[in-house]
Amino acid sequence: HCSTKARVPHVIQTQEGASFLEKHGHLYAVLEFLDATPFNGDKTLLGPIGREIATLHQSLKTLPRHLQDHCAQFGTRFHFAKGEQQDLFDRLQKHTHEVSAYCSKEDIALLLNAFHNHHPIAPKHCQVIHRDLHGDNLLISPDKNIWIIDFDALTYDERLRDVAFACHRLSCLPSPHQPIGETQDRAMSFLSGYHSQWPLSSTDRLDLAPYIIDEALRRTAYILKAVFHNKD
């Protein structure tokens, strides 16, 4: 359905020519095997990865309207019912032992402070996005081709949210404890690659840090919701 070429694995069709099977209410698809391994943090690949992700975004932007609407309706969104978020915060304060395996009491205090002082971002530049761009979903072949996989979280949301999340996750590889200067250099390598394929305005660049914070809080709240409400 896309007019530009992002490297993604091809779907293997069934004997009947279908692209997926439905079984017990779930959809399944078989993808081609790729002789490639997950991205290991190689700094020289951050620019090419940025370009590949920008190409993917250009591809997704060309999806027909009915497919964009489908992603908007069924994509992964980190939303809460009325009163659910406050209940989450209350339980987090009273039952820190339930998340002690995930973070310390000091981390929880910082998290609660971040939630209470955070203001959601007004949506802009919305389109279909990948929503889960991290090292394990970027495969590198022996000839250094980059493949993007794992599209089950596709949704309709801000493109900059995808860019910010990828920049954050990839710049922290191979270790989140590396010197801040190294993390900044890695982030710039990624963003320069992305910018070469799909230019980012100065305003877009300034918006990346708020998007990183916003996305981190939304995902953290979503995980805690699973712990507290769904017992997952």
Image: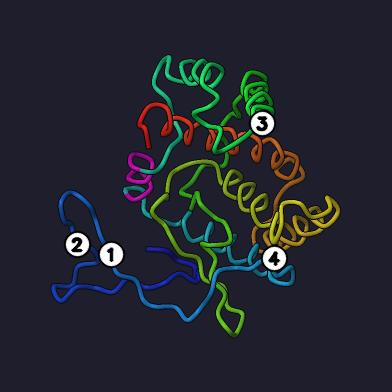
Left or right, residue 12 beside residue 229: left
Residue named by callout 1: 29
Residue nearest the observer in this picture, 48 or 137:
137
Residue drawn where x is 53% and y is 57% of the image: 57
Q: Which residue is mark 3?
A: 107
Marked residue nearer the N-terminal end (2 or 4): 2
Lower sequence index among marks 4 and 3: 4
Residue on which the image places disc 2: 21
Give whichever of 80, 203 is nearer the camera. 80
Q: Position of residue 43 (x, y in %)?
A: 74, 68
Mark 2 Cα shell of 10 Å, populated few (<14), some (14-19), many (≥20): few
Distance CA(mark 3)–CA(mark 1): 39 Å
Whether label 2 touches label 4, CB < 8 Å: no
Q: Quadrant of residue 142?
A: bottom right
Question: Looking at numbered disc 4 in the image, what kind of residue is underneath it?
Answer: Leu
The magenta span reads 67-74
Mark nearer the N terminus (3 vs 1): 1
Task: Specify the quadrant of the image occupied by residue 45.
Answer: bottom right
Percent x, y of residue 76:
41, 42
Q: Observer-nearest residue: 50 or 96?
A: 96
